[in-house]
Structures are given as structure tokens and as C-alpha cells.
Amino acid sequence: MKEIAREIRTLLMGIIAKREKAIRNGETTKDDLLGLLLESNMRENEQNGKSDSSLGMTIDEVIEECKLFYFAGQETTSVLLTWTLIVLSMHPEWQEKAREEVLQHFGREKPDFDALSRLKVVNMILYEVLRLYPPAVMLTRRTYKTMQLGDLTIPPGVLLGIPIIFIHHDPDIWGSDATEFKPTRFAEGISNATMNGQLAFFPFGWGPRICIGQNFALIEAKMGLSMILQNFKFELSEKYQHAPYTVVTVHPEHGAPIKFQRI
């Protein structure tokens, strides 16, 4: 682990040094996260007459942000797409509905950003996959002051665990078909998906610390799934064994062998 950490740090330090040099030479653009972080840092320090990063983010903090966005963003979205392909292989009727919608909006052209937001069937499918197989199975929050939750008084400094995967599968919230794949439950949006309208869907967390990459992840997933549906039909291999298990995120324990047929 230490060797991998050193390798990642060395790679990121090289990228950061190259980008800082480009910024100083006026060659940079503001179209990615790293550029925004570094330009903001330099501007903050210049305005306050500082030559170091004592007022902005340190290089170590920039490195940690890069690691967070890359690893957290890549892992969770890839897991979402993997489970989506598995579920659509198990439910070919929904695969066809999604493909029809994608071809209706894009044909064989590359999906564009504006039209991605109009994919209702694809959106319902992704929400239902996130409900059944949330990448993170639990959220943690620590109380910073005495909090009142119903009849329970919780002192400051208590770590609370919120079991997303159990809440997402609770029949008292979602109905007797809570363990079934039913995208239509999201036909009227997230707020109307549960039986009594209570908020119980939070694969990206909730509140002030909700996942900062939520919108990006969903756009990325819609784009990836749309391009797969445009070009392939797919079904599960006979070797597939359904066994979700958790290693930081929810994975298929025995992999996801899927057979693709170009269309």
C-alpha cells in the first residue's frame, strides 16, 4: 500500500508541476478540476501578497482532492454501470425499453448533454439500480453538539451509522416488492417513489455533505449506458453467479461475465 501511495503521489506531483508551469506561462484553461484548484490557489496568494500556499490549499491538499475525485468517482460510477448491465441482462424487456428511448433521442449519434436530461426510462433504471445496489452501503455522521432525534437525545461526538442498503430494501418504505427490480416506482420522481412519500432514497448521501459528484456521476452513467445500448445487446453468461458483497462498495463477488452482441 505504501508503494502504491508513493507511486500515485509521484504521478500527481508531476501532473501538478506541469500544470502550474502552464498557468504561469498563460497556457492553461479552466476546464478541469485541477486547473481550477491551482488557479484559485495562485490568485488567493497573489491577492494577499504571499508566495506560498498558506492562505490557499497546500499541495498535499490538492493531491488528496485529486485522489478523492479520481478514485471515488471512478469506482462508484463503474460499479453503478456494472450492476445496471447485470440487471438489464436479467430484465431484457427493460433493456429494450431503454434502447428504444436512447435511439429515439440520439439515433446512432453520440449522446449530447441536453438530451441526456430527457431520458426518463434510463433515469428510472439508474435510480432503481442505485436503490437495489447502492455503491456505498452505509453513511456515517458524527454529532458536533447535543442532537434530538425523536425521543432520543444524542450527545456531541457520537458516530452514527445510517444503513443505506437496509433502508433501500425496507418493505415498510418501498412496499412488498422492495427487493424486486421495478423502475416504474421512480416514474414520478424520487419524492413520490416510496409508499408514503417519505424521503428514503440517498445513494449519494443527503444534507450539506451530499456527494459533490452526484450530478456528474449520473451524467457519466447515462452517457456510458446510452452508448452501450446504441451499439450492443447483452445477456448474462451462464457462468454468472448472483452474489453482491461489499468491499468498500457493493461488487458482484464472482464478477460480471456478460455476453455482448453488436447491433
Image (cartoon, rainbow, N blue to C red):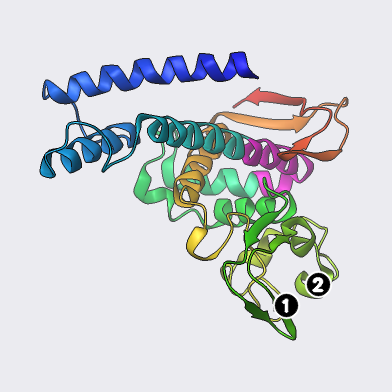
Residue 119, placed above or below residue 142: above
Start and end of the magenta stretch? 79-95
Residue 27, placed above or below residue 151: above
- Residue at image coords 68%, 66%: 185
The magenta stretch spans residue 257: no
Q: Are marks 2 and 1 in contact (CB under 8 Å)?
A: yes
Which residue corresponds to mark 2?
Answer: 175
Considering depth in this image, is 77 or 211 the residue closer to the camera? 211
- Residue at image coords 75%, 59%: 163
Which residue corresponds to mark 1?
Answer: 195
The magenta stretch spans residue 91: yes
Q: CA distance from mark 2 to mark 1?
A: 6 Å
Q: Tell me which amino acid carries mark 1.
A: Met
- Find residue 127 and report its horizontal and vertical position in percent: 62, 56
Considering depth in this image, is 38 or 155 the residue closer to the camera? 155
Q: Residues within 10 Å of mark 2 (few under 14, many from 20)?
A: few
Q: Identify the disc placed on residue 260.
A: none
The answer to which image quadrant residue 236 occupies is: top right
Q: Earlier in the sequence, mark 2 or mark 1?
A: 2
- Find residue 183 and report its horizontal and vertical position in percent: 68, 59
- Find residue 178 and report its horizontal and vertical position in percent: 81, 64
